[in-house]
Amino acid sequence: MQINEPVEVETLPSGMPIRFTWRGRLYGVLSTPEPWITRRRWWNEHTRVTPGNAVLLDMPVWRVEAVSMTGGTFSEGIYDVARGPGGATWMLLSASSEEIDQLLFA
């Protein structure tokens, strides 16, 4: 499911995510995250490009298997996190878990 919401991410010095907080819930990464590259959805962004400033279209993404560590449930899922435009913030791009599926499709 596409999410596209800001998240707080804790990383190792190498930049690899180890934990993230989404909607007040803490998630712990269970296995080694998988890095990959995707294209930014630049046509959905409100930012403008000024002449002479290059805009990167490729966006590094980390696919993580994580478990919710708060709220009394320990549902595992697959999550894609990436640094937002400018690199100052992180975004949760997508999520897939049994808990989310039950909430959406029950």
Image (cartoon, helix red, strand yellow):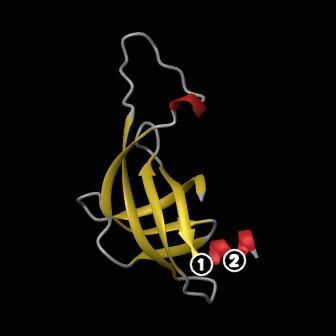
In which image quadrant can residue 38 be found? top left
- Residue 37 place in picture, x, y as percent: 34, 46
**Residue type at mark 1?**
Glu
Q: Residue at left 59%, top 78%?
A: 98
Q: Residues within 10 Å of mark 1 (few under 14, many from 20)?
A: few
Which residue sits furthest right?
106
Q: Position of residue 31 (x, y in %)?
A: 32, 76
* Mark 1 secondary-structure assignment: helix
Classify 86 as above or below 71.
Answer: above
- Residue 23's spot in the image, x, y percent? 63, 65
Numbered label attached to residue 98: 1
Front one among 52 and 74:
74
Q: Residue at x 47, y 44 (%)?
A: 84
Query: As drawn, is 47 to the left or to the right of 28?
Result: right
* Apparent side of residue 46 relative to residue 105 in the rendered image (left or right): left
Assign the C terminus to one quadrant of the image: bottom right
Q: Are marks 1 and 2 in contact (CB under 8 Å)?
A: yes
Res 29 label: none
Which residue is the site of mark 2? 102
Q: Please tell me how crowded label 2 is: few (under 14), some (14-19), or many (20+) other residues with Cα within 10 Å.
A: few
Asked which quadrant contains residue 80, the reply is bottom left
- Provide the secondary structure element on which disc 2 rests: helix
Quadrant where the N terminus lies?
A: bottom right
In the rendered image, the vertical position of residue 9 relative to residue 70, given as above or below: above
